[in-house]
Image (cartoon, helix red, strand yellow):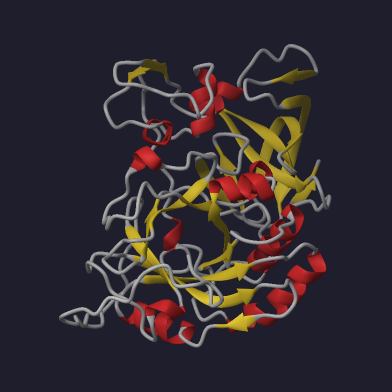
Amino acid sequence: MFHKNRLIKFLTVVLAAVFFVAAGSGVSHAAVGDRGTDQSVYQGQYGRTAYGDEKFQIDQLGGTVNGWSTYTQWTYPYQVQNGIARGQHVHTYIWWQNVTTNAQADSVLNQLLPRVKTPRGSIVALDVESGYQNTWAIQHACDRIRQAGYTPMVYGYKNYLLNNTNLYYLSQHEQLWLAEYPDYAVRRYPNYHFFPSFNNVGVFQFTSTYIYGGLDGDVDLTGITDSGYTKNTNPAVTQPAQHPAPAQKQQPQAAANTYTVKYGDSWWAIANRYGMSMYQLASINGKSINSVIYPGQVLRIRANQQTAQQSSNSGSTWRDGLGDTWHKENGTFTANTWLNLRWGARTSSSRIALLAPGQTVKYDAWSNHGGYIWVRQPRSNGYGYVVVRNAVTHQAYGSFK
C-alpha cells in the first residue's frame, strides 16, 4: 500500500491500449470471496481498472506521518465517485504513522473524518504499517470512526503489527485487513498457502501486483465490504458492541465429529466451513494455528462455537474450554442499543440474531474477557452470548434486573 511520501516501487508501464469501463446502472452485491483493489494517488485521478469483475475498492483519503498534521490526496474524491459509478462498493483508508496518543488520534480524525466521501456505514481503515504505534490510540481511533457512523478496520502486515502493536487485543475488537504476498508476479487470485493466519481477518491483501505495473489486490473474507451498501447503511453513532461481524452463515443441522484434511486446506478454510474461528478449531485439536496440517490428517470438528464453551459448571465459578472464567448469576438484561447475540463469547463468533433496543435476554452466567462483560443465554440448542458492558469504560449497553 502506498502513501504520498513513499517511493514508487514499480516502473511506469505504458499500456498499448486504454480500456474505459462504462458506468454501471446499479451497485454490485459483494459477497464472501469477492475481489477488489485498494488505490491511492499513484493510480491517478480516476483510479485503475483491472479485470472488470472486482466488486469493491478502498481509496486513500490521506493520512498523517507525524501524528498531528495531515495531508489529503487530491485523487480521493474522483476515485470514490468513479468507483461508485462503476457499481463498486467503495471504501476509505487513512495512512496512520507515529500516532502514539489519543490526543493525536483525535487531532488527525478531527481533520480527516469530515472529508470522508464514502457512504455512512462504509469502511474507514487505518493503514498501520510504518513508524511508532500505540495500540490504545489505534483502538481509540477505531472507536471514534465507529461513533462517526463508519466501519473501522486495521490494515497492516502481520509481522509489523505483531512487533509494534498488541494485535491480539485489536483483533478482539476490530476486523483486520492483513497483507502477505508470496512473490511479485502478476496474480489475479489469492494464494491461501500464504494467508497470514490470525483471528478476525476480514480482508486479505494477497498481492501488490494484481495487474501488470502494480496494483494491490484484495479478497473479502467475511462480507465486510457490503458495509454501507447492503448492510449497516444507517448506523447509530454509538454501537460499541456492534462490531463488523462475519457474514452470517447457516448453521449446519448436524456436523460430523471429524474432518479429513484435503489438499489446499488451511485452518481458516476448514473453520470457515463449519462456522468456527481458526483459534477454536486449533484449540479443539490441541494445536495452534501455526501448526502445519497435511492432507489425510483427521481433525475434530464442532458445529457451533458454543460447544467449546460448554463445560462442567457445577460450582459458582468455572473456566470454559476457551480459557474464560464464568460466574453463575441469573438475571434479565434489557438492551438500550443494537447488539449482536452470538454463538460464542467472541466478537468474531457467528451471529444468532441482532437484538433491538428494548429486547431482553435471560442469562445464567457472566464473564469478563476481551475488554467486555458477556452474559450467557441458555437456549434449546446450546447457549447464546451477548456483550452487556464495556469492561474498560464501564459503559453499560442496557439495564439489568
Please tell me which residue is depicted at 56% across the width and 22% down the height of the picture.
308
Using the image, determine if residue 62 lies above or below residue 235: below
Dividing the image into 4 quarters, which one contains the C terminus?
top right
Closest to the observer: 217 or 305? 217
Left or right of 209, for residue 130: right
**Rendered position, 354 above or below 364:** below
Residue 381 visible in the picture: no
- Compared across the picture, whether 283 is left or right of 221 comes to right
Q: In this view, does 188 lie to the left or right of 326?
A: left
Q: How many labels does the image show?
A: 0
* Residue 119 image offset from top left, x and y in percent: 49, 76
Of residues 337 and 138, the one nearer the viewer is 138
Instruction: Name the residue: 56% across, 79% down.
Output: 116
Q: Is residue 381 left or right of residue 106?
A: left
Q: Evaluate whether residue 262 shows in this view.
A: yes
Which residue does the image show at 74% across and 44% down from the upper left?
371
Where on the picture, by quarter, is residue 65?
A: bottom right
x, y percent for residue 53: 24, 64
Residue 359: image x %, image y %? 64, 49
The image shows residue 273 at horizontal and vertical percentages of 36, 34
Q: Quadrant of residue 272?
A: top left
Residue 87 vs residue 35, the one in the foreground: 35
